[in-house]
Image: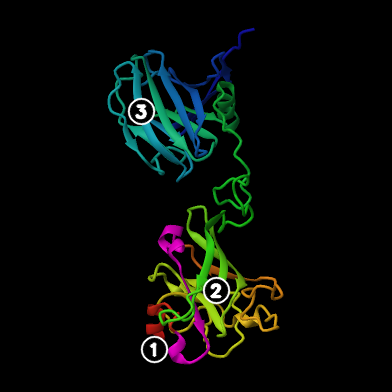
Amino acid sequence: MKKAVVTFLFFIGIISESQSVKAQSQNCDITKINGGGFSTTIKSVVCNPNNTYTIVLQVSHNGCGGPKCKELSHLSIEAAPGTYSNMSLQVLSGNMKGGNLVVGPNLGSDPFQGFKFDNIKNIGGGKAGVLQIIYTLTSLQSQRISAKAGTNGQIVTFSIADFRYVMNCNGTSCAPLPADSDGDGVPDAQDEFPNDSERAFSNKVAQGTLAFEDLWPFNGDYDFNDMVIEYQLTAITSNSNKVKDIKATFKLRAFGAGFKNGFGFQFGNSTVNQSLITASGSILTEDFIQLGSNGLESGQAVPTVIVFDNAYELMPHPGGGAIGVNTTPGAAYQQPATVTINITFSTASYTIAELNLTGFNPFIFSNQQEEEKFTYPIIRLLHLLI
């Protein structure tokens, strides 16, 4: 059965409001009658990938004339301030002129806020035509549309349900967003820290084995077994790929030194802001290394981490005349010792490349005489001596 259209017209001051029952066509449109020959149709509602909505309305005039069919002066669209953008007006048929965009949100005599197209001519008052309005909303909302002609506001109201009906009918609704528990923009399925908005990815940056000779550059045995350390550097990065944490794991496997050697490293980028860094996990048993409150070695221009200061405190000597630990054939094997250094940036400001983690500078040092600290990186030694 065909639906009958019933129009109610109310006059209140200079604003009148005309409402119609909803007419739904097979092509998913919803049309409402403004009055004075004007009608407004929701043509499409599309949910965009960024979860905004692009809406297309058409305002039509049937060409009627006379005192009840005045010429259109402006079209006003209700929208909450700050929620609308990309507004445009197109002429689909007829000879409309004007239509200057007024961004709003205040619209003069209109009883709502939003935007409008002003100073319209040549549509209504006996002149048929069809106009198309396109705009984007951050969220669907109930909206009034005024086709102002003469003193008549000629307002229709579309509910959120109306917009959803057109969107769902046309199959242009939003795809369900993947779960993102911490709201950092990285879906839980890809986020290794789904409940931590400052952390998203764990990146294995570098790994290898270091072998040191503690007599270099002086003449010696050059056996490079005075300290043997495996290492792995892992960077925890944010959703913008900036480093929040560094996990540096060092496994002391062997040392054939008579000296009580320690081990540390410097950042590959000497310009990193040390005030952003907090380091923990150092094992210090001697009294000649000074750390700042941030866990870095004091007095260094380059961020410097001391991992341990005496290898003999990490792996016990097997005795029996062995030289060092795990370097003398036939001596008792000692289990390697692992030390993990945790470095956190208060603000994730650097990428992995900017920190130059693969270019980190490892070194050993001795707690013997000052002249025996020749295994320090030269830049570190100079800063300590200044």
Query: Which image quarter holds the C terminus?
Result: bottom left
Residue 100 visible, this angle: yes
Tell me the magenta residue range: 350-373
Mark 2 or mark 3: whose residue is earlier in sequence: 3
Q: Which quarter of the picture shows residue 121?
A: top left
Q: Is residue 196 magenta?
A: no
Seen at 42% across and 18% down, the residue is: 60
Identity of the residue furthest to the top in this view: 1
> Which residue is denoted by mark 2 in the rendering?
225
Residue at mark 1: 385
* Tag 3 residue: 89
- The image position of residue 229, as x and y in percent, is 57, 69
Within 10 angstroms of label 1, few (less than 14), some, or many (20 or more) residues? few
Look at label 1 and name its amino acid.
Leu
Marks 3 and 1, the one that precedes in the sequence: 3
Q: Return the x and y of residue 192 as percentages of the image width and height.
A: 61, 52
In the image, residue 121 sits, relative to residue 358, either above or below, namely above
The residue at the point 55 percent across, 75 percent down is: 227
Along the viewing direction, whichever of 163 and 230 lies nearer the viewer:
230
The picture quadrant where one finds residue 283 is bottom right
Q: Amino acid at mark 2?
A: Asn
